[in-house]
Image (cartoon, rainbow, N blue to C red):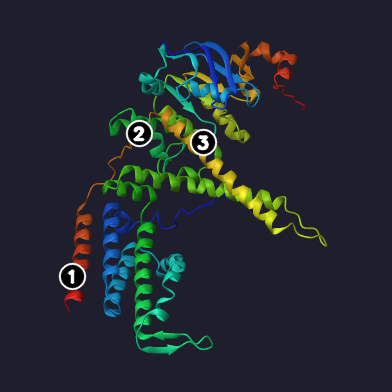
Amino acid sequence: MHHTIEVLNLRFTYPDGRIALHKIDFVIAPGEKAALVGPNGAGKSTLILHLNGILMGEGEVKVCGLSLAKENLGQARASVGLVFQDPDDQLFSMSVFDDVAFGPMYMGLSMDEVRLRVEKALEAVGMEGFEGRVSHHLSGGEKKRIAIATVLAMEPEILVLDEPTAGLDPRSRRRLINLLKELPMTMLVSTHDIPMVAELFPRMITIDEGRIVGDGPTKEYLQDQAFLVGHGLETAVPW
Amino acid sequence: MHFNLADQYHHRESIVHGLNPRVKVLGVVLYIFAVGLLPEGEWLGFLLYFLFLIISYQLSGLEFFFVLRRSLIALPFLLAAFAIPFTTPGDEWMKLPIIGWTITETGAIRFASIVIRAWLAVQAAVVLISTTRIPDLFWSLSALGMPSILVSTINFMYRYLFVLADEVLRMLRARSARSPRLPHKPKPPVLWEGRVAGSMVGSLFIRSIERSERVYSAMLSRGFDGRVLVKRKFKMKQTDWIIMVAVIAFVFMSQGLIHLR
């Protein structure tokens, strides 16, 4: 059991010179579920892309105890499942089967094993029997669940999701939250959905303008109205 | 609203639907070559190849008018052959009323032959795409040895064509929503409207590039390393061999008969 995410002194500058991340530091313990919150443009997605080496900044990123470097990217990508915000980016194949099988195929598994993985992954997200469907014709909620299945099929130890509930209707959102609740992996989820954070994630990491401005128990931060307003996270509940 | 080209015939069952897609692709390519090789004015030959198509409709359960409608898609390309009846040298056959252009007999025959060949070829292609699911079609291209980089390019094009079309649709809708017209007020200048259309194309281009980068990241995240993996999907069955041999025999015998006569 070493399913940790360790980010040490990470900095990243965009090609145009804009600084996206200043000195990011955090450690997520095995099995821990943490939320990553912050306003648009705070650097959440940029940070997430560092966790499996799509982007490489200065500083150190360790996943499962493995320090990310060019030589071990393949291994890191097998252990970190990254779910992108727009399922149309994640589902690039012609059929649901091809998409879910993509990761396992590149892991060099046998065809029988791949088929088994696809079946298990689709079952886990409640989308059995969708293998032959074309991704383009699915609804938003269905696409999202298939996108998660494409990552589950690799049986990653760490799951990283970028705004999983964005654009979902309440029922699809509820299904997704229940799904995330059941999944046993170490999890880091970037989101604007504060009610979901309150329900699912005991720990909340807040970033704003490329810096970590808060990291600790979700309950405490959600009661600190000045903090929420200060970082654009206030969630008025007028009803 | 989504753009949707899913075919209502894809999920039917017939001998043709059940064929190995490789056989269908090879057969159709062979058929199109053979149609292209038919000499001008070889009406019996054209009829023979048309009968071949009719048999394939029968075997695949496609309706003739469905294929006919679909085959009209190639009509605009025939404009390229439009000048032929007037420019081919030969005996005068008829004069167009009013404009007074003359049509030569060889020209008319050549034009009719080109139209028929094109129409037969397109119908064969329509049968192929109406009875083969698109993923299987792409699979068979790579199974037939088409370079995987080409196959995946077509694959991505097909996958994202619809996403792009949806995006265009949304942009057009957003434009119409903000294009009010008040009575007694002048329309905006055409040049300005042109500039708007131009910048829409430009932003579509940028969005596509950005999307391609995100898609590539998503592929890398799941272990993509530059190789394109092809799964084994279909095995050749007995019917596949029989149909394959039948198509090859038909093409070679008919071509032999026509050209040696």
For label 2, the SS is loop
Give the letter of the chain under mark 2: B
The residue that appears at 53% across and 37% down in the rendered structure is: B210
The residue that appears at 81% across and 60% down in the rendered structure is: B185
Write down the quadrant of residue A152 in the picture: top left
Q: Is residue B193 left or right of residue A34?
A: right
- Residue B209 sits above or below residue A15 on the image: below
Label 1 sits on what residue type?
Met
User: Which numbered mark, 2 or 3, is in the foreground of this view?
Assistant: 2
Label 2 sits on what residue type?
Gly
First in sequence, mark 1 or 2: give its number: 2
Crowd around label 2: few <14 · some 14–19 · many ≥20 (10 Å) = few
Is mark 3 in CB contact (under 8 Å) with mark 1?
A: no
Crowd around label 3: few <14 · some 14–19 · many ≥20 (10 Å) = many
Q: CA distance from mark 3 to mark 1?
A: 52 Å
Label 3 sits on what residue type?
Pro
Give the letter of the chain under mark 3: A
Provide residue B84's location: percent of width, then percent of height.
Answer: 40, 77
Provide residue B74's location: percent of width, then percent of height.
Answer: 43, 66
For label 3, the SS is helix
Provide residue A37's location: percent of width, then percent of height.
Answer: 62, 21
Write down the residue under mark 2.
B226
Write down the residue under mark 1.
B253
For label 1, the SS is helix
User: Which numbered mark, 1 or 2, is in the foreground of this view?
Assistant: 2
Write down the residue under mark 3.
A87
